[in-house]
Image: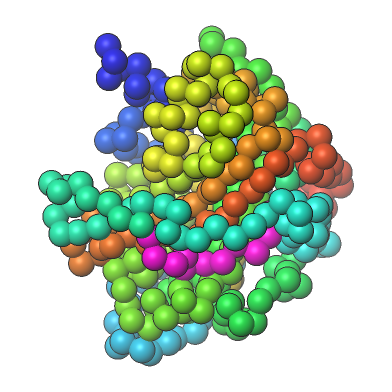
Amino acid sequence: MGSSLGKMMMPNCFPKKHPYLKDAKVNLKEVFEADDDTPFSSIWTAEDDEGESVFHTPNGSLTPERVLSEGPDDLDLKEGKLEYSSWPEGKGVVRPSEPLAIHGQLSKVTEQKLSFCPGNRFKLRIGPDYPNNRKKAVSGDALYNLRAVDMIEHKHKISHIARFFDRSKAKLNPEEDVMEGDVINGIPRFFIVSYMLPDYAPHMWSKVTDGVGFTVVFFFVLSKKGLEAIRKRTGAYRVLQRFCALKPNCPDKMRGPNLWKNVVSVANFRELGLNYMLTGYIRNYNAKPWLSRNPDMHKFRGKDYYEVDLDIHVYNYIGLSLMNEMKSSLSRLVLDIGFVVQSEKDDEMPERILGCGRLSNISYAQDCIKVDWDKYDEQMRAASA
């Protein structure tokens, strides 16, 4: 009973039914095979034949492409050698004629509420023989530096949010960031991660997986320490290179063990005075990595970036209810947030944090920017006509 309850409490263990999946009941060992017959043509969600919401991108289904990789599993490069390239534009991707904004300049979040978080705030896998030894240690420095965070209100989920931002004018640090190149030895100079969060109360028997909410966009740039990892062909670099080489939405069971992991730590949860259930939930799962898979994760590529979208709307009722209860405390939270691509084999160890940062006292009311998405929807439709 305790084990079953524990699984239910994990926010992404049992996402709601999703039309692409034969069985959307998920735990940390299950994978899915997607169905790729559904075409779409808007930046908003649509409905499937049963009236259920479908998250999608303009002029192309989010379902996996059957060709898994656009290159070799590992680039045939000698240690120290760097090769620069660019990724081709994704099929059917339409971009607005005018960017929404420069990363980090929509609000004061980046300037006032984002701070440095060292990689050693996170304990990750180490070898040898992790499946049996289960040993973890603090991570090395992040491969990417977090340079901006934007919070955007939406009336429906927005896919591939990087299309709406201008990366070329984002504020970077020449002493710490890689300032040139698009794709370097198979990994992009920029990484974008977005959390799509609901702002409506969940209902136990409801099929609603879309609606009013907000998106938190994390903008990362390759660090010079990350570039050094590329030169040395470390295990963490090779794992990330394989992750990026796969077609963005290939089926989970064909992706292999190198999966996306999220780590969120509430640094000040003991000071918040939360109720017994919330305090227990945070204590049990604080700073513990959880995997993202279909249907709660979608991936996209541009010429110089890789984007991972994490769709919280499809989480299970218990997870959503707990997050809904936390909304009133959001402005008091200090959050250390990190992302990592999972390592499995000894030669891939130790795991290394991809990117991380600290967000303090963010507020939906104060920090979330309202955007006229209808204007952009019209631009996209006109561009694709």
Specify the color scheme. rainbow
Residue at horizontal 35%, vertical 44%? 252
Residue 140 in the magenta stretch? The answer is: yes
Q: Position of residue 343 (x, y in %)?
A: 29, 57
Q: Is residue 77 visible?
A: yes
Residue at horizontal 31%, vertical 73%? 234
Q: Is residue 317 visible?
A: no
Most extreme residue toward the front, as rendered?
Answer: 271
Total numbered circles? 0
Q: Position of residue 274 (x, y in %)?
A: 58, 22
Residue at horizontal 57%, vertical 55%? 357
Residue 92 in the magenta stretch? The answer is: no
Which quadrant would residue 179 be assigned to in this image?
A: bottom right
Closer-to-camera residue (357/211): 357
Asked if 285 appears above or below 340 in the picture, the reply is: above
Which quadrant would residue 334 be assigned to in this image?
A: top right
Q: Which residues are magenta?
A: 139-149
Would residue 181 be found to the left or right of residue 80 on screen?
right
Would residue 375 be found to the left or right of residue 187 on screen?
right
Q: Position of residue 247 (x, y in %)?
A: 43, 58
Would residue 219 be found to the left or right of residue 101 on screen?
left
Residue at horizontal 46%, vertical 24%? 281
Asked if 81 appears above or below 4 in the picture, the reply is: below
Would residue 246 be found to the left or right of residue 93 on screen?
left
Q: Position of residue 204 (x, y in %)?
A: 54, 11
Closer-to-camera residue (119/69): 119
Asked if 14 appears above or below 259 in the picture, the reply is: above
Quadrant location of the N terminus?
Answer: top left
